[in-house]
Image: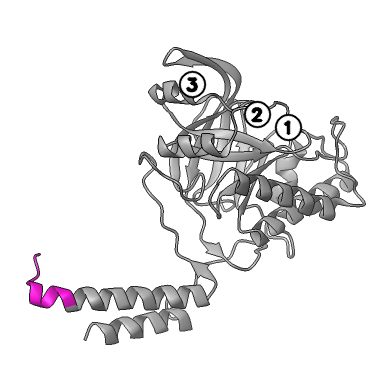
Amino acid sequence: MSIHPAVSAPRRTVRRLLAATVAGVLLAAGVAPVVDRPAGAAGYSGPQPGTFTGLGFDTCAAPSDAAMTAWLKSPYRAVGIYLGGVNRGCAQPNLTKGWVANQQAAGWRIFPLYVGLQAPCSTYQRRIDPTRAPAQGREAADDAATRADALGLARRSTLILDLEHYPAGDPACTAAVDQFVSAWTLRLHERGFLAGLYTKVTSAGLRDQVAAYGRPGHGVPDVLDFARWDGVQTVADEAVPASHWAPGRRMKQYQGDHHETWGGVRINIDSNYLDLVQPAWTRQSRTAPQAPPKWGSSLSRIVARTAAVALR
């Protein structure tokens, strides 16, 4: 419906005032509204990977700009980058602030991965010290956040801790991992980023984090990135309760180490399916996921009253 110019200007003013009032109320409540673009939009530079449903790939070393351009012919539209960590396996000559900016301009979504200290009961040489697990989790988060800032990734991006396989049945190992993951999550929130966790369904890592989900005081990662190499592009899995990391908080690595060629460029990759909605941001560190305010609360009443008055 068109609006006569004499009427439209006051209404636009009212709407702007209303929007500003609502935003002010939300900020006062510690909630920042999320603005995102469709997954296929070029030039996206918001929080990564943001709201996105579709296929992604990760590879040990960030491909060249030319390779990424060639791979626009692929079905993938998200790329995993290994931004740091003491157990990161590859050098990253291409991974620069300019590279990130170029991929964002081309429309790629990015999911940053950090391969830090591993479980004390794993076979990795660089492992969590059970006597320092919380401190080491915070240190890893600080390093990841600093590296994300240096690469030009937007605040509220999700930085994913890569937690590789470790065996079940060791309570001391589980306790150390839980403390590390919780500290990683809460410290990233303090630094303005969201936290993710990658683990395999065959590892005790997934079982332990499912058990810790919602535990008082435990920093729950905002996004779960789990690996089950069955070739099925879904984020539903019998190992993850339907109520956990839902909706829109999951990724699945559905195929491991293999080669694919697109646009004449061959790359060794893992394949992923992402089903993500950018999580709402709160300025305070979170433990268990928080429910949104219900209509009828003082916040909603303030917004409703403001709308009614502004539109009279």
Element carrying mark 3: helix
> Residue tagged by mark 1?
88
> Residue tagged by mark 3?
67
At x 19%, y 76%, the residue is 11
Magenta region: which residues? 1-9
Q: Where is residue 21 in the image (x, y as percent from the top left)?
A: 38, 78
Residue 287's quadrant in the figure? bottom right
Q: Which dot, 1 or 2, sits closer to the camera?
A: 2
Element carrying mark 2: loop
Whether residues under marks 1 and 3 lie with C-beta atoms below 8 angstroms apart, the answer is no
Q: Distance between the residues labelled 1 and 3?
A: 22 Å
Say what amino acid the circle numbered 1 marks: Arg
> Going from the N terminus, do you reach mark 3 or mark 2 first?
3
At x 53%, y 51%, the residue is 154
Give whichever of 217, 244 is nearer the camera: 217
Q: Position of residue 116 (x, y in %)?
A: 76, 40
Residue 241 appears in the rendering: no
